Amino acid sequence: MSSGVAASLRRIFIANQQHRLLIVSTCSVPRNQRTFSMQYKDTEKPPHPFDYVNKNYNFFRHFYLGGHYTLANIHDNTLFFHVESNFGVRRSDFVKRLANHIGFLPISKPDVDRMHFIDETGTINTRQFHNDYCLPRDRIPSPEEWHSNPDYHATVRLLRPLLQTMTYQLRMGLSHMFSTGQGIVMDRSYWSFYATLNILREFDFISQDSYDFLLEYKVSIDYNLKMPRLIIFIDKDPHAIWEDLKKNGKDYQKGSKVYSLELLQAMDRMYKEEWLPRMSTYCHILQYNENEIKTLDDVVFDIEQLNFDDTNKFPDWRLTVDVELERFRAQLQDEHFWTRMFNVNRLLHLSEWWTEPNAQKSQLGLMKYDPRYYWTTNNWDIKPFFRRYQSWTRLPFY
């Protein structure tokens, strides 16, 4: 065994006493247990995979009548991996390299404009359209604009589309996994939202009412999704992150009113003392620094030692009846269900979402004279009942 592989193997056992983070994953894999293996990298795809991008999966129509049997697509590498780190740590290159190396689908971090606000034609940004006619306090900020003015109104108008986009990414990623059998590697998935929301509240970038509402909002969604089987955490000292942001960050990061050394240190503690220990109850955790992730063979070796049938973990993956799995897969693509989950009327409880009397009526009156008013409906809008199970043009998710 090479020294690099030996060091990689030891990492799974050793607890990080400095940050009080215990890596709970185990190398003792019982025989006949499900493990990740590179032998499945070139597994032949289903001969007729379901077109989840352009169609809604229906339990009766596609399972009973169409013969799309989900369990037939699943093998040992049909897994969901999540890559996480503090703000300012580069993950995208590692996600792509790892996914391509092991034959998984890489899913990039959420791009709210591209994945949420661009219409089906790819020509109209509905966020910009809204901002052209709304009151200044009702503007929906881009991440760059929010960093320069992170008040309560801007934060809640950024976080709500972000939560919706992260949910959409995970739904479509799981749909891809169940339709093709190919595993997915996500760059900061939906399950990161809790840590981000708590830090924003701790530093008073979001009001207590908005925090309580969005947290309750997220909890109502949690039960309809699945947690990752493995979280790969890229560790970096907050002081090094802060120096790197000031030297090599983008312009909006250098002038950000959000980023600070104190916030990065608090986020580091949030991950290591709360979020990762909590998630370790449900999935495996592997921790690396930026130098260790350069050698993919060591990372893959660590993953191959993990038992993905651990009876003490993965409670939301224990679907033993094929009918339960088919119903879950159908719900992932039920756009009407998810549109109701994100109905904007639920936000009327938030004072930060309220606008001036008659402002919305006046805004709509002006927008009707703009050619962009007749933009093509996107995947969040309810379609007529008779088109529910027919074709559906979806926005990109990776």
Image (cartoon, grey):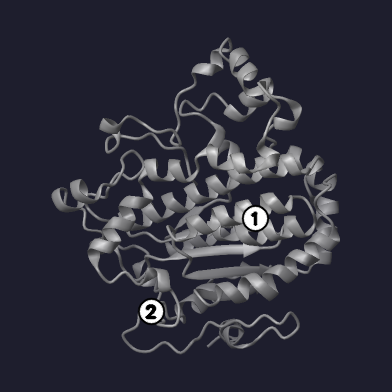
Q: Residue furthest left?
A: 65
Q: Nearer the viewer, residue 318 or 344?
A: 344
* Percent coordinates x, y for residue 164 in the rendering: 53, 45
Estimate the x, y position of residue 141 in percent, counting from the top left.
70, 36
Image quadrant assignment for residue 90:
bottom right
Quarter where residue 236 is shown: bottom right
Which three-letter amino acid code belongs to the residue tagged 2?
A: Asp
- Which element is circle 1 on? helix
Q: Which mark is residue 309?
A: 2
| Of pointers 2 and 1, the one earlier in the residue sequence | 1
- Apparent side of residue 201 relative to residue 71 in the rendered image (left or right): right
Q: Nearer the viewer, residue 124 or 325?
A: 325
Q: Which residue corresponds to the image point at 52% horizontal and 88% vertical from the top-left?
A: 1
Q: Residue at x 58, y 27 (%)?
A: 126
Q: Is residue 294 left or right of residue 302?
A: right
Question: Mark 1 highlights which residue?
Answer: 212
